[in-house]
Amino acid sequence: MAASALLPLVEPASWMLQAALLLAVQSGVGAAARRVPLARPVTVGAQVLVTLVLLTLVFAREHAVAGLIPGPDAFRFFADLLEQGGDDVSRYAIPAPLSDGIRLMLVGGVLVIGLLVDALAVTFRSAAPAGLPLLALYSVAAGLADNGVDWLWFLLAAAGYLMLLLAEGRDRLSQWGRVFGGATRGPGDRPPGAVAPVRTGRRIGVVALGIALVVPLGLPAMNGGLLDATGAGVGSGSGGGGTISAVNPLVSLRDSLNVDEDRQVMSVRSEMTDVSDLYLRIVSLDDFDGTTWKPSKRSITTVPDGTFPTPPGLGPDTRRTEVGTTISTADGYGQDWLPMPYPPSGVSIGGNWRYEPVGMTLVGDHGQNTRGLSYEVRSLHVQPTPEQLSDAPEPPPALEREYTELPDSLPGVVSRTAREVTEGADNPYEQAVELQEYFTLNGGFEYDTEVDVGSGSQAIARFLRDRQGFCVHFSFAMASMARSLGIPARVAVGFAPGTPQADGTVAVGLRDAHAWPELYFEGVGWTRFEPTPTRGSTPSYTVPDAADSTVPDPARPSRAAPVEPSAAPSQSESCTAQDKKLEACADESPQAALPTDGDGPKWYALLAWALAGLAVLVLPLSPMLWRTRTRSVRLGAHGRSEADAGSYALAVWDELTDTAWDYGVSPDESLTPRGAAARIVRLGRLDQGAAASVHRVADAVEQVLYAPRPRPVAGLADDVRRVVAGLRAPAGRGTRLRAVFAPRSTVRVVWAVSAWWSGVRERVVALRPTWRKPSRQQG
């Protein structure tokens, strides 16, 4: 019932029937083993063995001995299948398709949880702790779902747990017979409350359900692939050590820009004579909702053989040159999108790659990434003139409508600033140049990697006000302002030109990752602009003095960090089952870019995790902290006058006896102070000085108890400290550690809480009405 919470995450839900059948077999084996009966560990071992055989029969029959007994090949196959499932989880959006890897993770996970619940609740006859695995299963589903698990799934999980508690309670009562309820009630007596086992079950149920409701609220939002219902995550698929990837590219950019040492991720060799325009594009972000830029969901197909189609909007009159570029990636650089010069006209690469025709990008399939690759790209070096851009006709209506769309939440200052900056411009090209110069020359903007990443719909407005940021801020702001002017715009992410080497190659480092706007002009297509000051290179067609020159400005090494959108292909809804079998479906491209609600986890999620981390640190140390505080209070600077000499001496005596208790000398309340002191000296093996200190404290206590007017005694705190040193000296290491970190005397806290609770209950009972219903019997 708790596993039903996983149903919305994957389609189809046929895995649930398979999991239910295997779970029934697993539970049946446990019931039979208990009926024999077998020892409890043997019962659990039998269930584990049967579970492994069942999973082998279903998933790895071809790799098992006699098709049933798992061997080394079967375990290797399980490992590969789990790795594939992990890749699919990070790649697919909710609801994800039921791949073999995901099916193994779901069915295997349900069987593991079922085994834990059966062992705890039935084999070891403790139903209450069995709620923890169920709670874990529900919390995972709630954390992965878009807005939490539907209330129906919660009710199913809660009902299953309460039924488990009720069944255990009835079973315990059936073994003990009729519950003793006190004296026989008369006809007019009020019915008693719930019996103890029922009350206990209610309390456990309420606490467990409360935790199940609260825990998912404290889980941080998880983005990327199946971990994000919108598919807006960024990641490297399977991940791995040294992989340069991040769920939040803004945070990754800023963190990478501030690293002390740059790291080379690619080596590039190009036929271009001047590599200042050698931008390696990864993906374009064209869907803007006011807080986030991300790629639209588009179909991806097989990589075209030979020459790629002509880029959108590129006319025959625009000058272009086809160049070849060889790229070698480092073993530590593994992400799903393939860096290429734009627009590519052909790619020669091995491995599993798919092609997204609108953005003209390649994305890895079935765990394929860029780690340790060497590939060749043929691309077009497009060289438009300012006149061609100025005279560009209107773009197609459909394209203009799609790429000029802006959300209503965008602050008005964005479009207002765009109109002010471009006032007097005669055409979209001049407007675009004015926007670029506003950021790089005229607007007073500064490049600063220490600026906090923006959050929400006001991020661009804050950037325009503060005029400080890095490439993400500049590119997002210019693309948004261009759209407000009716110019189709999108944002490209990838790598700016790297650093030329003596051997003719170009080294692309971690800090060369970059983001820049692309604006559309009919006849030229998507055209790069560079609004980030001191980064990348200014396109020659945006510099009036260079109108007749084909040599761009010298490249300046970029200081940006890698932005690595993840591949998350999703199956098309129009794909039939037969097409799927024939692999004739066009997958949908993944979602990759910015976080959906600002940048990074929300403050309350960070607060919740900070409190949880603090609790993890404090709880194990709470006995030590309590004893330290108690010792400080008892031995503090009070009790110096005759009025409170008694309370001070008794507090010091309590501290001495508790310290002895911590070192293994338990208190004996039946002894006098003098007798207790002698016992502590004997059992604690104290030396002469420490023994004298114990007796001085005991004498002070006897004076308090028996003297008419007790007098203050100086030096009692020092006596206790000498006793502590005397108790530590002969004690072993384990005893000393326990006395510090797990002192026995902290049980007094439990006693105090129990006494307080008893007092509260007595007061509540005293407040209840004492009248009874009148008896209907006549006297």
Image (cartoon, rainbow, N blue to C red):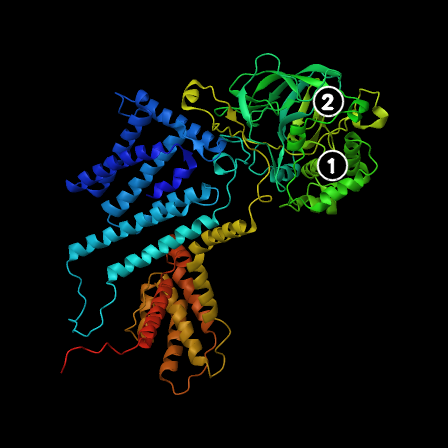
Instruction: Identify the amino acid type marked 1.
Output: Leu
Q: How far apart are marks 2 and 1 (CA)?
A: 19 Å
Q: Residue furthest front?
A: 397
Residue 314 or residue 174, whichever sits in front: 314
Residue 592 location in percent, x, y? Answer: 57, 33
Q: Residue furthest top?
A: 306
Tag 2 residue: 524
**Nearer-the-camera pick, 481 or 678:** 481
Q: Is residue 262 visible?
A: no
Q: Can residue 375 be seen in this view?
A: yes
Give me the residue at 45% from left, 35% from top.
95
Q: In this view, does 311 lie above or below 122?
A: above
Hey, which residue is sitting farthest right in the picture? 545
Secondary structure at badge 1 equals loop
Return the mark for residue 485: 1
Q: Dot 1: within a 10 Å radius of its alpha carbon, few (fewer than 14), some, or many (20 or more) residues?
A: some
Quarter of the image with the N terminus is top left
Q: Where is residue 606 in the image (x, y as percent from the top left)?
A: 54, 49
Q: Do the residues labelled 2 and 1 touch (CB within 8 Å)?
A: no
Left or right of 262 on screen, residue 432: right
| Residue lying at 43% horizontally and 69% vertically, measured from the top left | 720
